[in-house]
Amino acid sequence: MLQKGLHYFRMSMAVIYTAIGVFILTKPNALKGIVDESYAPIIGALILVYGLYRGYKEYIVESNNNKDE
């Protein structure tokens, strides 16, 4: 039961990171006052890639756990 809850939490975080990355890529003014506007696409792309990586990694871990059962 706890493993399923952690899986859903990790997948939710992957979706959130991916959404934040897409948001920053489409609205570079969102980081105005925090970082220079020219860095916004780089930061957005890094967060997007990190979210996709987390989702992929969790998918692989979960699929391997299902094979063991």
Image: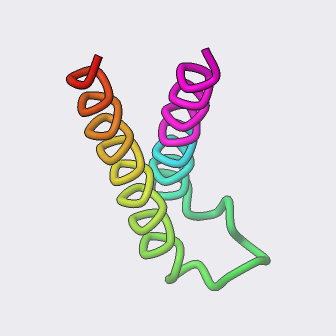
x 76%, y 77%: residue: 34
Q: Where residue 20 sits: x, y (%)? A: 56, 48
Report the label total.
0
- Indicate the position of residue 48 as horizontal and vertical percent values: 41, 55
- Which color mode does the image show? rainbow
Q: Determine the main secondary structure of the stretch shown in magenta.
A: helix
Of 3 and 31, nearer the camera is 3
Q: Quadrant of residue 59?
A: top left
Q: Quadrant of the C terminus?
A: top left
Q: In which quarter of the image is residue 64?
A: top left
Q: In this view, does 47 lie above or below 58?
A: below
At horizontal 54% and vertical 48% (from top left) the residue drawn is 17
- Any magenta on residue 10? yes
Position of residue 22 measured from the top left corner of the image (x, y, whole percent): 45, 48
Q: Decide: is 21 above or below 65.
A: below
- The residue under the point 62% across, 22% down is 5
In the rendered image, residue 55 lying in the magenta stretch gets the answer no
Q: Where residue 45 sits: x, y (%)?
A: 39, 65
The residue sitting at the right extreme is 33
For the point 38% across and 40% down, which residue is it? 58
Rendered position, 48 above or below 37: above
Residue farthest to the front, as pictured: 69
Query: Where is 16 relative to 8, above or below?
Result: below
Compared across the picture, whether 46 is left or right of 12 comes to left
Going by the picture, which residue comes out furthest to the left? 67
Quarter where residue 46 is shown: bottom left
The N terminus: image quadrant = top right
Residue closest to the eye, 42 or 26: 42
> Which stretch is magenta?
1-15
Q: In the image, is 56 to the left or to the right of 44?
A: left
